[in-house]
Image (tube, helix red, strand yellow):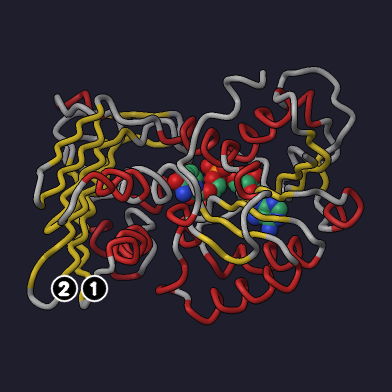
Amino acid sequence: MRIATWGFGAMGRGIAKNVIESKFMKLVGVIDKNPEFIGKDVGELLGLGNYGIRVRDSIDVIEETNPDLVVIATSSFVKDVLPQIEYAVKNHANVITIAEEMAFPFDSHPEESFYMDSLAKRYGVTILGTGVNPGFVLDTLIIALTGVCTRVDKIVAKRINDLSPFGKTVMETQGVGTTPQQFEEGLKKGTIVGHIGFPQSIAMIARALGWNITKIEEERKPIISNVYRETPVVKVEPGMVAGCNHSAKAYVGDKCVIELYHPQQIHPHLEGVETGDYIEIYGDININLSIKPEIPGGKATIAIATNMIPIVISAQPGLICMADLPVPRSILSFTR
Ligand code: NAD
């Protein structure tokens, strides 16, 4: 399988490394606009020695290398990745993207979704949005657990994670390092957004269960630190914001059927907070799943984006979501 990656940042780099190290895939091209990478050998940048492919800032890479699939890891938003997806599809390549809004764009971006679906079908390829979350913890995993329930009344899930490994962009969108006043202003201006993906995860669960969601309420609260916290990209004095406690509730009529909580902060352990992923399902049977500590976001996103490659290549053409595909599994463990 010939694979290209569009985006060679923290995620794209990991996916490229997985592809190079697997026995059945070949990395044929890498696109990134970062001047630090352009013109450099991909293998050298990954610490693997010369690989013979250089990072280029040109979409021509796709046409010239003719990949079976392009992994797009450049942005969170449909508006940014749509032209990239369009270009890949028009060059007959399947697409996996980790853009959060692409995990289930059908409800949030109906026109764009219709266009992408039609285009993919015309070119006979498949487009999938995935990632750790959205894409797995607060949607696909929940949906899989409902497979053993005859009736589901309510879902409550929480992902408590550590933001410390992430870069500047994530700190800014989560409001880490701001004062409480700056946090409120950022929310109003839209520069602080918290987690991207609640509407997508809720819509994916709702479609799987046949629920007609009538209202989604989201709440974003600052996590104010009582202690000094620091990462390579941000410093947080006591009294400042260490993260964003973002939650969403989805209703059918006046009945709340889904509650999702995603408090994200740097160094949660400094105030005794343990990370973890928790899913409770209430219905004819009650399920209570606890994963401690959290499934690590970066490594898991790199893994799932790679693991889905053969599944996407052999899937039906069109724009699809994780719930449309076979159960994800680690393909890399037996091919290395
Ligand atoms: P990053 O900032 O480290 O890397 C992004 C890379 O894309 C950069 O190297 C940048 O130069 C490149 N890029 C951006 N626009 C480009 C363009 N038009 N052409 C060429 N290169 C371009 O980010 P990351 O940590 O690798 O994450 C990538 C995206 O995936 C982010 O938006 C992030 O929020 C999202 N993400 C989603 C999940 C999920 O669970 N769904 C998980 C992790 C990351």
Q: Mark 2 highlights which residue?
A: 252
Rendered location of residue 268, percent (x, y): 23, 30
In this rendering, position of residue 59 left or right of residue 167? right
Q: Report the quarter where the N terminus lies.
A: top right
Residue at disc 1, secondary structure: loop
Residues under numbered marks 1 and 2 in contact, where contact means CB atoms less than 8 Å apart: yes
Q: Which one is in front, 35 or 283?
A: 283
Any mark on residue 213, and which? 1
Q: In this view, does 240 lie above or below 129?
A: above
Asked which quadrant contains residue 91, the reply is bottom right
Rendered location of residue 88, percent (x, y): 75, 60
Q: Which of marks 1 and 2 is nearer the N terminus?
A: 1
Residue type at mark 1: give it: Ile
In this rendering, position of residue 305 left or right of residue 85? left
Residue at disc 2, secondary structure: strand
Q: Which residue is drawn at 28% across and 42% down?
A: 264
